[in-house]
């Protein structure tokens, strides 16, 4: 049985790895240049900067076992971050003793490890799907994928979609024509997807001339324009030798400034850092990254999309389970198990 997985973030990688271990032939497709999705890091001269997911935790027993394997292989390590909260204009130490993990030497390392032995198609934006069944024109039944250059891949006997809901819905509604088998089921499945389940996030990384005078490695910001701050050079193995702070803007602020120029975002990040820490800073270098689909929308209805045996189709993503890296992995494994139960 051959399976295509679209999306090489944690959810897609977990699904593909689970299927491959069970003996299925798997191919992974992603529009990016490498695996990682929102767990991607930016390579700089002396190390890495994490612009998306900042760390992950392990609460589920199965995921904890996976993390233990990553720890043993060196794909992840602990981040003993000193965490604070900023709320009501005050900075207070966090009493949270949660164990936090990061990829080593970059956040996407464990994702790459899951995909290391598989067939991966990067820089491949799947722009169209075609579900063929009871074919009369000589095509074999199954899923066909078409990239941005109209190259065709397939057929695959099953398909897993591990991507943001907006992109997912766009692909689903074009996979069948109204007079073809599977059309009604695809439309029903598409209607369950919540396009607004993920909200945007601007990430800004600021390199400072002098270290901030604070004991904090990370700050959970509970008000204003920012949702998260992290001292990136506090992360083990990153190689950063200067004080570098990552600013994640809130979904509301990110949406308001969705089309802002980098210089505007950098100036706003600098002002927010000075406001929260109450000290002036001198920025020597900076970079920005816009995540269009990043932060969980608490107002969106949570839906459970199960494997469709009729379509041979499963959906995976952290947004199906309320966010977090751990839930991305769990969602990917669940999607793979749906496929395996139908083999």
Image (tube, rainbow, N blue to C red):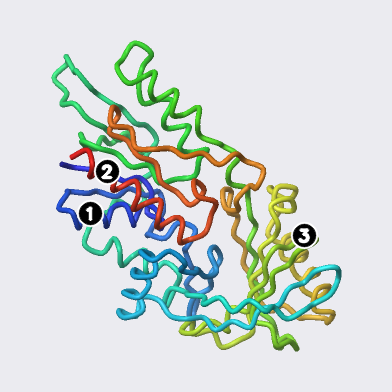
* Residue 337 drawn at (x, y percent): 28, 47
Instruction: Give how far across and how far down residue 114 sits, in percent.
Output: 30, 63
Mark 3 secondary-structure assignment: loop
Q: Which of marks 1 and 3 is nearer the N terminus?
A: 1
Q: Do residues under tags 1 and 3 come within 8 Å of each other at their CB atoms?
A: no
Q: Name the residue under label 2.
A: 4
Q: Distance between the residues labelled 2 and 3?
A: 40 Å
Q: Which residue is drawn at 49% across and 79% down?
A: 45
Residue 94 pos. (x, y %)? 69, 78
Label 1: state its secondary structure. Answer: strand
Q: Based on the displayed image, in which of its 4 quarters is residue 271 positioned?
A: bottom right
Q: Nearer the viewer, mark 1 or mark 3?
A: 3
Residue 30, above or below 44: above
Give above or below for 112 relative to 77. above
In this rendering, position of residue 133 left or right of residue 291: left
Mark 3, other Cα within 10 Å: few <14 / some 14–19 / many ≥20: some
The residues tagged by marks 2 and 1 sit, at their Cα atoms, a distance apart of: 10 Å
Where 1 falls versus 288 (above or below)? Answer: above
- Residue under label 3: 225
Q: Residue furthest front?
A: 61
The residue nearer to you, when weighing 213 against 223, is: 223
Few, some or many residues within 10 Å of mark 2 (<14, 14–19, 20+): many
First in residue order: circle 2 vs circle 3: 2
What is the distance, in whole Å, between disc 1 and disc 3 at their CAs? 41 Å
**Quadrant into which the C terminus falls:** top left
Q: Is residue 149 visible?
A: no
Name the residue that disc number 1 marks: 119
Mark 2 or mark 1, earlier in chain: 2
Whether label 2 touches label 3, CB < 8 Å? no
- Tell me which corner region of the image, top left, top right, bottom left or bottom right, holds residue 10: bottom left
């Amino acid at each position: 049985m051959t399976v295509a997985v679209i999306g090489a973030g944690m959810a897609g990688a977990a699904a593909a790895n689970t299927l491959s271990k069970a003996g299925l032939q798997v191919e992974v497709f992603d529009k990016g240049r490498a695996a990682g999705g929102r767990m991607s890091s930016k390579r700089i001269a002396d190390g890495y900067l994490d612009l998306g997911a900042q760390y992950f935790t392990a609460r589920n027993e199965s995921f904890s076992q996976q993390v233990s394997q990553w720890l043993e292989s060196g794909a992840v390590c602990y981040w003993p971050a000193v965490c604070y909260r900023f709320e009501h204009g005050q900075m207070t130490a966090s009493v949270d003793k949660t164990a936090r993990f990061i990829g080593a030497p970059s956040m996407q390392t464990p994702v790459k490890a899951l995909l290391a032995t598989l067939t991966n198609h990067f820089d491949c934006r799947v722009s169209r799907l075609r579900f063929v069944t009871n074919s009369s024109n000589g095509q074999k039944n199954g899923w066909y994928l078409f990239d941005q250059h109209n190259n065709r891949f397939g057929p695959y006997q099953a398909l897993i979609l591990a991507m943001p809901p907006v992109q997912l819905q766009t692909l689903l509604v074009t996979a069948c024509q109204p007079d073809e088998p599977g059309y009604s089921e695809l439309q029903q499945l598409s209607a369950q997807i919540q396009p607004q389940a993920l909200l945007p996030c601007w990430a800004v990384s600021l390199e400072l001339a002098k270290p901030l005078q604070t004991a904090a490695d990370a700050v959970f910001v509970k008000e204003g324009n920012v949702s998260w701050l992290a001292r990136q050079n506090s992360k083990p193995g990153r190689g950063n030798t200067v004080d570098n702070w990552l600013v994640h803007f809130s979904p509301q602020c990110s949406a308001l400034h969705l089309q802002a120029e980098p210089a505007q975002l950098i100036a706003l990040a600098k002002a927010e850092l000075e406001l929260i820490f109450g000290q002036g800073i001198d920025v020597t270098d900076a970079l920005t990254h816009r995540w269009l689909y990043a932060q969980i929308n608490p107002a969106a209805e949570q839906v459970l999309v199960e494997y469709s045996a009729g379509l041979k189709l499963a959906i995976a993503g952290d947004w199906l389970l309320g966010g977090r890296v751990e839930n991305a992995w769990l969602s990917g494994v669940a999607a793979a198990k749906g496929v395996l139960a139908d083999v």
